[in-house]
Every structure is written in C-alpha cells, then in structure tokens.
C-alpha cells in the first residue's frame, strides 16, 4: 500500500474530526426518530441534502471493552445488516487503518461497497472512532456500486464501569435508489446499536 494512501487518509481524517465533534456537541435542530429498548435516535439534514443519523445509549461495558468490540471486524456481521464482506485492507498502526466492506441489497438493487479510512483517538473523557471514504485504494467491482461514507463515528464516553455512546452516520449509497429506501437504511442505525447493546451484556 502506497504511503500516499496513508498521507491522504490522515489528511481526510484530520479534517473530519472537528466536523464530527461539532455534530456531537450540537444540541438543537435534531428530529426525533424515537426510542427502542434504551436506544434513542434522531436526525438532521447535512448541507449536502443527506440525513445525519445520531443514536445514543448506555452500554454495559467499559470504554476499552467497547472500543475493542467496534475495532474487531469479525463482530460486524452481528450488527451490520446485509453485510456480505468486511476486511482490513491495510493497518497503518493500532488505531489507524483502511477497511473494505460490501453489502448485499435486495434484488434488483445492486450491492454497495465502501472503502474507508478509519481511526480512533483518545479524548479527556473517552474515545472517538471515526471513518470516511477514501478514493483510489481499490478498483471498483463490476456490478457493485461504490458508495460514499461522508462520516461514521462513535463517541465512547466513560461513565463509571459503563460507556455512554453516541454514534453518527452520514452515507451516500449512490446510484438509483428510492429516497424511502435510503431513509430506511439510515434509520436502521437504532436497531444496529440495540443489537450491539445486547451482544455486550
């Protein structure tokens, strides 16, 4: 893997961090998506017209344990709906990597795949994990639409022996998809965190 990919990934993620911190701190303007089994969701429009979905909950594990769970790609099939493949393309360090994933959608909709740069950093009160699409790493696959992750992030805040978690999700699935399908996939983030919460008990 060329060093240029590492440099570009670092630049992307450095620029992304203040953006996601702003949305983590944003209190006003969110539309409620409801609460299910202790998991609360809301959404707001990104300037690009896509929706940002925010989901919050309290997880019954420490921050290091939750970080280890999220960083373990073998766990993803448990909570990522329709995940067909997920693998690490390149580990740059223990907290910085490139990841490829592909999702099998219902026929006749083409599969979607993503290549993201992903990193985690410590904060005063916890850890933030964040990802963004990186172009030029892997060639596109025939019959599969390459989507774009504007950002996906998890803020893991210490709370005694538990973890207060806030997740952000903003992704463009590309191609011809009905808006209702796009919204349905985005809103599934509440259920995803619910699965993670149960798996961590």
Image: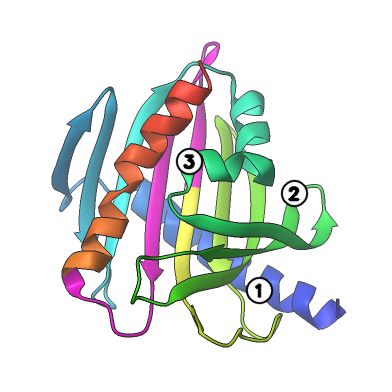
Relative to 139, residue 72 above or below: above
Does the magenta portion include 159? Answer: yes
In this view, the residue farthest toward the front is 107
Earlier-in-chain disc, 2 versus 3 = 3
Secondary structure found at label 1? helix
Q: Quadrant of the N terminus?
A: bottom right
| Residue indicated by mark 1 | 11
Secondary structure found at label 2? loop
On the image, the x and y values in percent for residue 12 come to 60, 72
Residue 59 in sight from this viewpoint: yes
For the residues labelled 1 and 3, say whether their Cβ atoms are less than 8 Å apart: no
Q: Is residue 118 left or right of residue 114?
A: right
Q: How is the image coloured?
A: rainbow
| Mark 1 or mark 2, whichever is nearer to me | 2
Earlier-in-chain disc, 1 versus 2 = 1
Gap in angstroms between the C-alphas marked 2 and 3: 21 Å
Gap in angstroms between the C-alphas marked 1 and 2: 15 Å
Relative to 148, residue 167 above or below: above
Instruction: Please state which of residues 115 and 52 is positioned toward the viewer in this rendering.
Output: 115
Instruction: Please state which of residues 60 and 79 is positioned toward the viewer in this rendering.
Output: 79
Does the magenta portion include 68? Answer: no
């Amino acid at each position: 893997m060329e060093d240029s990919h590492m440099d570009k990934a670092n630049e992307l993620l450095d620029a992304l961090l203040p953006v996601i911190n702003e949305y983590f701190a944003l209190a006003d303007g969110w539309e409620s998506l409801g609460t299910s089994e202790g998991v609360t969701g809301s959404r707001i429009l990104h300037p690009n017209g896509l929706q940002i979905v925010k989901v919050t909950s309290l997880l019954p594990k420490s921050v290091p344990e939750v970080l280890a769970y999220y960083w373990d790609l073998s766990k993803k099939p448990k909570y990522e709906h329709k995940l067909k493949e997920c693998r690490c393309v390149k580990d740059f360090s223990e907290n910085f990597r490139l990841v490829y994933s592909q999702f099998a959608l219902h026929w006749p909709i083409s599969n979607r795949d993503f290549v993201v740069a992903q990193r985690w950093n410590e904060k005063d009160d916890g850890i933030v994990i964040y990802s963004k699409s990186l172009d030029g790493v892997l060639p596109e696959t025939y019959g599969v639409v390459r989507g774009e992750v504007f950002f996906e992030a998890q803020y893991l805040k210490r709370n005694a022996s538990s973890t207060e978690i806030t997740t952000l999700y903003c992704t463009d699935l590309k191609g011809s998809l009905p808006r209702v399908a796009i919204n349905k996939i985005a809103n599934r983030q509440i259920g995803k965190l619910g699965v993670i919460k149960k798996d961590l008990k």
